[in-house]
Image (tube, rainbow, N blue to C red):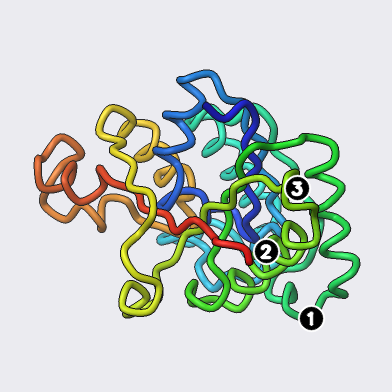
Amino acid sequence: MENHILVVFPHPDDESFGTSGTLAKRIHEGAQVTYACLTLGEMARNMGKPLMANRVTLPELRKKELAESARSIGIQDVRMMGLHDKTIEFEDQDMLDGMIRDLIDELKPSMIFTFYPGYSVHPDHDATGAAVIRTVAAMPKGQRPVVNCVAFSKGCEKILGKPDVMVDIQDFLPNKFGSIRAHSSQFRWKDMLGSLTEDDEQIKSRFSKERFWTYHFE
């Protein structure tokens, strides 16, 4: 079992759909989790329906939503890394890699979750995943944590193959749904459910598996 898991994503809410159930399950099994969120997602287009924020107040709102999501999942340690939304691909690579390496050296995680570079739709997602991969690749082979990646670009399975890891999170759906609901400025959970409820078997089936590609270093 993983003793310490490091999660590296660029935005509040990145944890919700792809990893929240898995993290809740691993925490239940005894793992410590640190979530390094690189930005506050302050450039997001969504500000709630009805409107909940403006460009000035959105960062603080998203910080609160992230804290609520982390509580729902059970994450013990949230790090807000202070970078600017929609700029990760333009950040100095040495600075970014050094930030991630410092976290690895401090926490000594056995596993890292991040996005699969090139297969995660948003430039911030891809740049974040690329930084994690570069950083871990530069480590001695015997010291590298396992890196499990989230990928969801169209047709990614045709290129990457089937996911290496499938996690059944049926017992942790309340944690996942709570994480999604926490980000109310970005998602209208009721709209996603439509006429169904969280207890509907169709909803449970839709959300009960999380998939990851383990990055295979040369």
Counting the numbered discs, the total is 3
- Considering only order in the chain, which callout, 2 or 1, is on the residue closer to the N terminus? 1
**Image position of 174 with respect to 180: above or below:** above
Mark 2: which amino acid? Ile
Q: Which residue is mark 3?
A: 80
Relative to 147, is 208 on the left or the right?
left
The kind of residue tagged 3 is Met
Report the Cα–Cα distance between label 1 and label 2.
Answer: 17 Å
Residue at 68%, 75% in the rendered image: 86
Q: Nearer the viewer, mark 1 or mark 2?
A: 2
Residue 26 horizontal side relative to residue 35, left or right:
left
Q: Residues within 10 Å of mark 2 (few under 14, many from 20)?
A: many
71 or 195, nearer to the observer? 71
The image shows residue 75, relative to residue 11, as above or below, that is above
- Residue position marked by numbered label 2 in the rendering: 133
C-alpha span from label 2 to label 3:
20 Å
Name the residue at 69% across, 32% down. 77
Front of the two marks 3 and 1: 1
Secondary structure of the residue carrying numbered label 3: strand
Q: Position of residue 97 (x, y in %)?
A: 82, 62
Q: Residue at x 59, y 59 (%)?
A: 53
Q: Earlier in the sequence, mark 2 or mark 3?
A: 3
Mark 1 is on which residue type? Answer: Phe
Residue at image position (53%, 18%) is: 30
- Local secondary structure at mark 1: helix
Mark 2 vs mark 3: in front: 2
Of the numbered discs in the image, which one, if any, rests on residue 90? 1
Question: Does 57 sit above or below residue 85?
Answer: above
Horizontal side of residue 120 vs 140, given as left or right: left
